[in-house]
Structures are given as structure tokens and as C-alpha cells.
Image: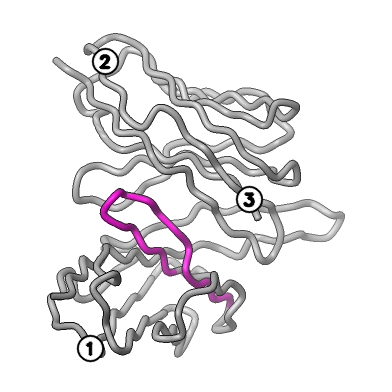
Amino acid sequence: DTAVSQTPKYLVTQMGNDKSIKCEQNLGHDTMYWYKQDSKKFLKIMFSYNNKELIINETVPNRFSPKSPDKAHLNLHINSLELGDSAVYFCASSHVAGTSGGGKTTYNEQFFGPGTRLTVL
Amino acid sequence: GENVEQHPSTLSVQEGDSAVIKCTYSDSASNYFPWYKQELGKRPQLIIDIRSNVGEKKDQRIAVTLNKTAKHFSLHITETQPEDSAVYFCAASIGGSNYKLTFGKGTLLTVNP
């Protein structure tokens, strides 16, 4: 079974259109992320949600609006698409990282989805 | 914020040789350093990680070393095989509830048979 899934896998659209990408994870994780990978393969965090609450927003244009209806889903809606939005978008999820009792810091592996290749013409 | 530099950007080795990829980070508070492998057209996958309280970690043919004083860490792959060919990303993170990974720009490793 696919742990982190994204739809669609490919998305080709015209400039100015609005589109959405959906992400679902069945790992029971409470933290989800969106990354953008450009043509040079650079991976950059865009957003992170923990228990449906936005915790990271990396100065992404407000044309990008993430929405988390529940812990297992994190969707990305993009308004007024531009040529520069062409990239592969990866969703990822992990258990929450944090500091537990006694001051122990925990880190958790991020599991990536298969990616959505967005091409804006 | 954190800045991660990764070198080289491309690396070509003969099958059976070793490969080393190096990364430096800027934020001395970073304390978690994972490495991801991304095969062509596939998703990034974690292959090994190291915490700041450890200097070295091995897993079969791969190993990672960390020098906190110099703020650099390296990935070592021994006895390379063609299936090791991929893009490798290092990353750094500060632990905590808002932890996020800052990735290096990746190294394209090609293992020639």
C-alpha cells in the first residue's frame, strides 16, 4: 500500500489558471509538508502542517494556499499559475518532531510522496 | 536561517570505487543531519541520518561522519554499484516542534559499470 500518495501525477495547464494538488498519507503521521523541486533539482520546503495547524510558511507567494482538512490530508491550491511555478511538487509526512519530557529532542524521518510534475504553458 | 552547501554537484566513479559527498551547514544549533537518495523520476528516500551527539554512523556500505566544530558532514559509499547511481541530498535541521529540513543542492552520482 502506498504510504504517501499524491494526485495528479502530472498536471499541464495554461498560465493564469487555478489548480489543486492533493496529498494523503496512511502512516498515522501528524505532520505534513509541501516541497518544491525546481528544474535544477533543488528541494525547498514550502509549508508544514502539524495536526491541521500551519507551522511553517516559507515566504511562499500567497497564490499558494495549503489546506489540511484532517491529519491525513494536505492539499495545495495554486491561483493564477505562472511559468515559474513549473516544477515537481512533493508532499511528505512524518511523526511530529519535538521535545519530550526530560528535554529529549526527537527527530523523525520524512516520507515523501511520488511527486506531481506541474507544467505551466 | 540555515544554509547548507553540498559538494560536488556531480560525481562519476567506477563500479567498486568509493564515493564521498561533503556538506557544510551554517547554523551551529543544527543537530540532525539526514541524507536522502533520489533515483531518476522517483521520490527522495532517507538512506541514513546522524544526530549531533554522534560522530559517525555506518549502515553496510554507507557511512556518515559529522564534525560539529567545523560544521560539516560527509556521506561515504564504499564498493559502489550501478544501482547507487542517483541524486543524493544532504540536509540539516534544528530539532523541535517547528523542525524543518534545509537541503543541500544535491549531488548527481554516476557509477560506471
Query: Mark 2 belongs to which subunit?
Result: B
Main secondary-structure element of the magenta-colored stretch: strand
Could you confirm whether marks 1 and 2 are on the same chain?
no
* Outermost residue to the right: A102
Could you confirm whether marks 1 and 3 are on the same chain?
no
Q: Quadrant of the C terminus of chain B?
A: top left
Question: Is residue B67 shown left or right of residue B5?
Answer: right
Q: Quadrant of the N terminus of chain B?
A: bottom right
Looking at the image, residue B91 lies above or below residue A72: above
Q: Quadrant of residue A95?
A: bottom right
Give the residue at mark 3. B2
Closer to us: mark 1 or mark 3?
1
Mark 1, Cα crowd under 10 Å, few <14 / some 14-19 / many 20+, is some
Q: CA distance from mark 1 to mark 3?
A: 33 Å
Give the residue at mark 1. A16
x and y percent of residue A33 in the render?
A: 47, 68
